[in-house]
Image (cartoon, rainbow, N blue to C red):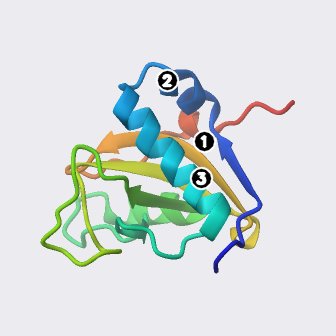
Amino acid sequence: MANAVKSVLLGTLFKKEFKNFPELDRKLISKFIKHIYDFGFENLEGANKSSDNVRWDDPYFIKKVRYAIDNHLWHYHIGIKQYDTAKPYGQRTSEFVLHYQLLNNGEEIRIVDYSSHPPFKLPSIAYLSIETE
């Protein structure tokens, strides 16, 4: 899947909030975007997972799984505050995840939210919108 990504967009609300993130967070998110453009999803340090991978004992399991599938949601462990280096490269988790939509057969990603995990929270529908130019 290397270099398959042709477009990385930012959701409207995420874009507005991004400028107020701490500098280190902005740098790590920008580094992720550059990596995606240069290498696709190959050799990412953090765990990158489909967001339909919901714990089976979650009381809203079915609702969350459907929402994640319907909206093509994924999340990437971005390394904020730090990676769990006890896990192997490519499977490292961190407190914060970057939520994105994987669209157009993997050619486009839309970064829509950023949140701590656990608990795992999917981005609200408001975060999935994007301004068209």
**Residue 2 seen in render:** yes
- On screen, residue 74 versus residue 61, left or right, reads right
Q: Quadrant of the C terminus?
A: top right
In this view, the residue in front, 120 or 30, is: 30
Q: Which quadrant would residue 46 be assigned to in this image?
A: bottom left
Question: Which residue shows up at 35% across the image and 68% down it?
Answer: 47
Q: Amino acid at mark 2?
A: Glu
Q: Tag on residue 58?
A: none
**Disc 2 and disc 3: Cα gap in Å?**
19 Å
Earlier residue among tags 1 and 2 = 2
- On screen, residue 116 versus residue 113, left or right, reads left
Instruction: Give the residue pinned by disc 2.
Output: 17
Q: x and y percent of residue 82 in the render? A: 21, 50
Q: Amino acid at mark 1?
A: Leu
**Residue 71 seen in render:** no
**Disc 1 and disc 2: Cα gap in Å?**
14 Å
Q: Label 3: how many residues lie within 10 Å, few (<14), some (14-19) or many (20+)?
A: few
| Local secondary structure at mark 1 | helix
Q: Amino acid at mark 3?
A: Lys
Instruction: Give the residue pinned by disc 3.
Output: 34
Instruction: Give the residue pinned by disc 1.
Output: 128
Earlier residue among tags 2 and 3 = 2
Above or below residue 15? Residue 42 is below
Question: Which residue shows up at 24% across the image and 73% down it?
Answer: 56
Q: Spot the residue most to the left.
A: 86
